[in-house]
Amino acid sequence: MAGPAGHAGNDAPVGGLFRLAGRTGQIAEWLLGALLLFVVAVNVVNASGRYLFGYRVVGADELMVYTIIFVVMGGAVLGLARRDHININLVPSYVSGRTRVLLFLIHDLAAFAATAYAARASWDFVERIARLDTRSMALGLPMTIPHGAVFAGFVGMAVVAAFLILRDISLLTARVQATSGLPPGPGDRP
């Protein structure tokens, strides 16, 4: 991950922060990949034990589901940071320069509003299940852990959206903009 898509190569004040975020994103991708491999290994052990030896690993299904929740929420944060998520990019593909940055800004504002709202709702739910001390059936894991992962994912996405908003605003308000500072448009491609 070289940095958030549409924002590579800018000398704006937050540029160093985005380079650091890009490196952190690469590490996170490797960790998420390792977690997926862990889920596959648990599944192989559980399935082979069940069908070959008549033995099942207690809580394996729960463990796999909870791990996938962490992976999905982590991937969602990385996807938003790279602008590599499901979106409609027909209009931005036909504009460049400030207009494209303005479209990104509108998108980032919507992403921030949606994820901040979802984080708040998720936190309310985590508080409720914490008061009830709800636990998973097989592992006895407090349900605040997987639901806390959902909360953390939404908070992470809100933080990423906030940084992207700052980046977009800095690009829009910059007096002199280098060509590399703006997301490429159709006329900018070789």
Image (cartoon, rainbow, N blue to C red):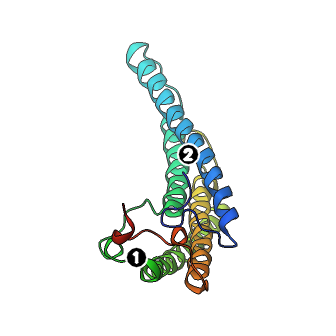
Q: Which mark is residue 116?
A: none
Question: Mark 1: which amino acid?
Answer: Ser
Up-down relation of residue 154 to residue 31 (above or below):
below
Residue carrying label 1: 96
Q: Nearer the viewer, residue 56 or 174?
A: 174
Q: Which residue is nearer to you in this view: 24 or 181?
A: 181
Residue 157 in the image: x percent, y percent?
A: 56, 66
Would you name the residue on which mark 2 appears? 29
Viewer-nearest of discs 1 and 2: 1
In what element is the residue under mark 1? loop
Q: Quadrant of residue 90?
A: bottom left
Instruction: Give coordinates of residue 59: x percent, y percent.
Output: 54, 35
Measuring 55% from the left and 53% from the top, which residue is drawn there? 2
Q: Looking at the image, is mark 1 or mark 2 earlier in the sequence?
A: 2
Give the x, y percent position of residue 109: 51, 80
Q: Is residue 47 left or right of residue 1?
A: left
Q: CA distance from mark 1 to mark 2?
A: 29 Å
